[in-house]
Amino acid sequence: MNDVLDQFFHSLGHLFDEAETCLTPYLPGQEFVALLAFAFYVLLIVSGGLVAVLARNLVRATLGLIVTFFGVAGMYLLLASPFLALMQLLIYVGAVCVLIFFAIMLTKNTSDGDEAKFPKISNLILAFLAALGPLVVAGPLIYQGTKAITTRKPVDSGANLGEGLLSIDLLPFELISIVLLVAMAGAVFLAYRPGSKEGSAAL
Amino acid sequence: MFLSLAIVAQIIVAVLLIIALMVGNAVVMVYMERKVAGFIQRRPGPYEVGPYGTLQAICDSMKLLAKQLYRPGNVDLILYYLAPILAFFPVLLLYLPIPFGPYLTALPVGDGVILILAFAGLGVLSNLLAGWSSNNKYSLLGAARAVSQTVAYEIPMILALLAVVFLSGSTDLKVVTDQQGPWPWQWNIVLQPLAFFIYLVSLVGETNRAPFDLPEAESELAAGFHTEYSGMGFALFFLSEYANMLLVSFVAAVFFLGGYKGPIADGFWWIFIKAYALMFFMVWIRWTFPRVRFDQLLNINWKWLLPLGLFNLWLTAAVIKVAF
């Protein structure tokens, strides 16, 4: 364990040394194109998100979600991480969304379900507050810590990423797995009905 | 502003060539499929139109183009028309990273194989949307089958490709090709026979071809997810099916059969010969094997291909670790 931590701190120091050298010079016009692309991806994310929230039909809502995922993948491209962008598409569009579709098809899909009605005002307020939560937590960090983000070497290949996940980014990597575990436990908790004869009758 | 104009021009030319390839491939494949089916079933196949029936596919496509677009009532309008488009266009992207020759790549991408796998997921999505938006139980059943099948067969496919990626240490299709020699015994198929077998089985499952064509099993589901499509809607599904077949054949050629390399002279002719040999193989098994049952289909995948793929991956990693 000590070795890992040693390596962790060592490479952390190393990263800041390399930060100056790894900035690639950019060509004239590139900034404008990047801005244009950024605007386009923001448009994709926002419009997809609106469709996902406002659609009165679950399949269309999921389609909106897919558009949002494409926008996020584009953002990864702008952050010089093509590998991550492709992984975003492979996992979120290719697997997660397809599984959501599958769940929709397995469930009874009536036109007068919960999603077809306009939600209660109290629910809307709660949802808004929940959406504000990450902004409150991450906002100051983003505002203050932008320089710290740019000093990182861009993750430009799978090998690079794998190396990072097993050395300097080991801690965040493990934290994410805990988040996933919590999500899974939550899903089981939501679907489990104690005392019902059919077991997982939530479907 | 001028920095990427050359790249943009290159991509536009490449996309046009790829569309030509897709359409030409569909014409050739329709003829090949019908002719091979004919010979396997001891009948001549198409022979009336043109010499040896070669113009039959052209006539078929003319008929499809001229056909009325019939739309049943109660479909989800947007999704119904979106689905065939979504089936066709992502396939264009999938051809971009494939090295057809030493210098003939539309867009050299470092993570080429991941790009292909990422955008291949949109194909399932289109089947799903088509089946769902048609508002018809046969279509919906076909779509549900398409999803569970494609999601399942993607995993052994990725595992097989991953074994080769382990060997060559890169996800770049060009690098994978470069590490193989021109002669058959220098190809990856010799080092990874099990991976090639797994890939071969799962590519049939992934492209919804017989004997794994459950999503469009006509004897039980009318025509599966595209029951309600006519004219160009159906034609786009058809085109993308053949384009997907060609794509997985190209990927197999690159990963296991040496890509554009071959005896005497390297070039795009070798990769085309290899890919079309695989296409012929797929047509061949379509007309000689009966369709499997759906539970059998999933059992083959989850109980055989997936453990085999994991074992093969572990073996590859162990051998690389010990030997190098």
Image (cartoon, rainbow, N blue to C red):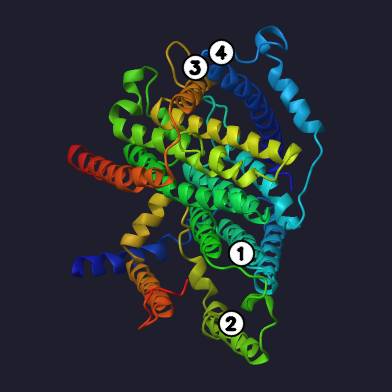
Q: CA distance from mark 2 to mark 1?
A: 19 Å
Q: Quadrant of residue B53?
A: top right
x, y percent for residue A35: 70, 61
Q: Amino acid at mark 3?
A: Ile
| B16 horizontally vs B39: left or right | right
Q: Which mark is residue B43?
A: 4
Q: CA distance from mark 2 to mark 3?
A: 62 Å
Q: Are marks 2 and 1 on the same chain?
A: yes
A154 up-or-down from B59: above or below: below
Q: Chain of mark 1?
A: A
> What SS does tag 3 mark?
helix
| Residue at 52%, 43% in the rendered image | B116
Q: Which mark is residue A131?
A: 2
Q: CA distance from mark 2 to mark 4?
A: 66 Å
The residue tagged 1 is A62
The residue tagged 3 is B40
Q: Mark 2, residues whose alpha carbon is within 10 Å: few (<14), some, or many (≥20)?
A: few
Sequence-first disc among 2 and 1: 1
Q: Amino acid at mark 2?
A: Ala
Q: Are marks 2 and 3 on the same chain?
A: no
Q: Chain of mark 3?
A: B
Q: Nearer the viewer, residue B38 or A126?
A: B38
Q: Nearer the viewer, residue A124 or B188?
A: A124
